[in-house]
């Protein structure tokens, strides 16, 4: 008998998840445009309200309002196609409350990484919503699924495996990243498959797996599917698109940065992150960049000792200040050559298979 797949996932007619990009890079416009192509659009829950007048005074309220507005925008653009998710980083303060805001705004899925979303099922239990972790090892996958099984008697609706070529925060140890020792995403898939299979059997369901990090061609996605994945989560390729929510200056960096050199910087979130080399990353190599404010947004961050403020750096970048801002990027930035539409990106990723 065929195993159960969450019925909501049937709306995903294109097996592409647009990766969540905070701060302000993936909001309603990008997410809704991806949905209109049958994919899963993802709004980042990291300060979506950064442009609001009262943001500095009351960031939570500004972000809450923005989530509702961005969800509405995405739904309008989607023409009722695709699925809508939010990306919630486990490391943010008031994680539970932010997830609740997204649930009340009516999203279809919560995708959560930058840590293990151990408590996610407790927050979502009264909602008809898909839940998915982002993991970077079979060990993390096993730990999370075991915990959800034991404590909540449930499992993931789908899983994102993020490999070392991804942009933003990376779930690998520094030695794995700096010495290129991290396992590639296809190897991770082979290791994660038996773990996932165990819970598929236990819950008599299918748990689709999406590979993230460097999945920027049809060939790579075909390879993932041949190995048993359902599709890919893609982020960097969607940045230089007309529909991406970032400032034009930010998008320009992905096309016309002189070297497209990338750096790995230690983030206050507790992970290393991949970003384009710019005056900020150079300053960070030399020492501390004192923050101008504190929004108390990251659990492990201390204003007095943090090497820099991740929110300030990402907000500056999203606004187009690519000198003092942090421009996160995946390793495939070298392959980006021109501004595209979301439809063009997805057509290229899928080839004729739509
Ligand atoms: C600019 C940028 C910002 C990102 N922000 C987040 C984030 O806030 N939360 C998260 O889980 N992943 C974040 N990511 C990771 C992406 O969602 C995605 O999984 C990854 O970059 C996929 O690899 P690709 O960029 O090579 O396609 C970010 C990536 C980029 C490039």
Image (cartoon, rainbow, N blue to C red):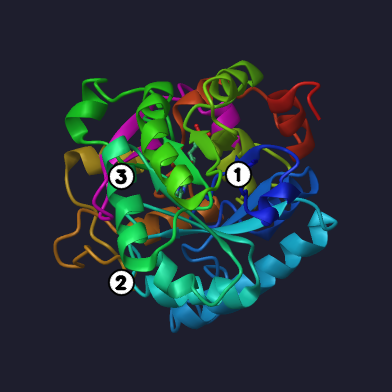
Q: Position of residue 238 (x, y in %)?
A: 63, 38
Distance of label 3 from label 1 (alpha carbons): 21 Å
**The quarter of the displayed image where residue 266 is located:** top left
Per the image, the residue denoted by label 1 is 3
Distance of label 2 from label 1 (alpha carbons): 48 Å
Task: Identify the mark nearer the N-term, 2 or 1.
Answer: 1
**Figure check: 215 above or below 160:** above
**Are circles 3 and 1 on residues that touch, CB within 8 Å?**
no
**Figure check: 125 above or below 61:** above
Q: Is residue 200 left or right of residue 15?
A: left
Quarter of the N terminus within the rendering? top right
Per the image, the residue denoted by label 3 is 142
Per the image, the residue denoted by label 2 is 294
**Are circles 2 and 1 on residues that touch, CB within 8 Å?**
no
Q: Looking at the image, which residue is at 26% across and 46% down?
A: 271
Task: Identify the mark nearer the N-term, 3 or 1.
Answer: 1
Q: Is residue 234 left or right of residue 271?
A: right
Q: Secondary structure at mark 2?
A: loop
**Figure check: 96 above or below 334:** below
Q: Which residues are magenta?
A: 252-277
**The quarter of the displayed image where residue 173 is located:** top left
Distance of label 3 from label 2 (alpha carbons): 35 Å
Q: Secondary structure at mark 1?
A: loop
Q: Is residue 342 left or right of residue 122?
A: right
Total labels: the figure holds 3
**Residue 207 can be seen, yes or no:** yes
Pick out the residue farthest to the right: 79
Q: Position of residue 18 (x, y in %)?
A: 61, 44
């Amino acid at each position: 008998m065929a195993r159960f797949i969450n019925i909501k996932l049937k709306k995903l007619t294109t097996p592409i998840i647009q990766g969540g990009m905070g701060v302000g890079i993936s909001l309603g416009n990008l997410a809704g445009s991806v949905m209109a192509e049958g994919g899963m659009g993802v709004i980042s829950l990291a300060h979506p309200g950064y442009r609001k007048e009262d943001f500095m005074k009351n960031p939570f309220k500004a972000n809450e309002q923005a989530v509702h507005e961005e969800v509405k925008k995405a739904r309008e653009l989607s023409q009722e196609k695709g699925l809508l998710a939010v990306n919630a980083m486990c490391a943010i303060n008031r994680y539970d409350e932010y997830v609740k805001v997204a649930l009340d705004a009516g999203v279809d899925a919560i995708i959560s990484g930058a840590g293990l979303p151990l408590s996610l099922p407790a927050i979502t239990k009264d909602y008809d919503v898909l839940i998915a972790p982002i993991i970077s090892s079979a060990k993390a996958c096993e730990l999370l699924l075991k915990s959800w099984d034991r404590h909540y008697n449930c499992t993931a609706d789908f899983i994102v495996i993020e490999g070392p070529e991804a942009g933003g925060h990376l779930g690998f140890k520094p030695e794995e990243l700096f010495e290129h020792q991290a396992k590639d995403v296809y190897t991770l898939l082979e290791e994660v498959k038996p773990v996932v299979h165990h819970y598929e059997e236990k819950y008599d369901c299918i748990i689709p797996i999406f590979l993230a990090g460097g999945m920027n061609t049809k060939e790579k996605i075909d390879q993932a599917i041949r190995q048993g994945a359902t599709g890919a989560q893609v982020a960097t390729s969607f940045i230089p698109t007309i529909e991406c929510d970032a400032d034009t200056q930010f998008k320009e960096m992905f096309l016309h940065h002189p070297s497209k050199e990338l750096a790995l910087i230690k983030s206050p979130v507790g992970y290393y992150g991949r970003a384009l080399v710019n005056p900020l990353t150079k300053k960070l190599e030399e020492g501390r960049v004192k923050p101008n404010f504190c929004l108390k947004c990251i659990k492990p961050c201390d204003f007095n000792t943090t090497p820099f403020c991740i929110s300030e750096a990402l907000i500056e970048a999203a606004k187009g200040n690519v000198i003092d801002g942090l421009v996160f990027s995946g390793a495939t930035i070298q392959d980006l050559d021109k501004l595209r539409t979301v439809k063009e990106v997805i057509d290229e990723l899928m080839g004729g298979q739509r």
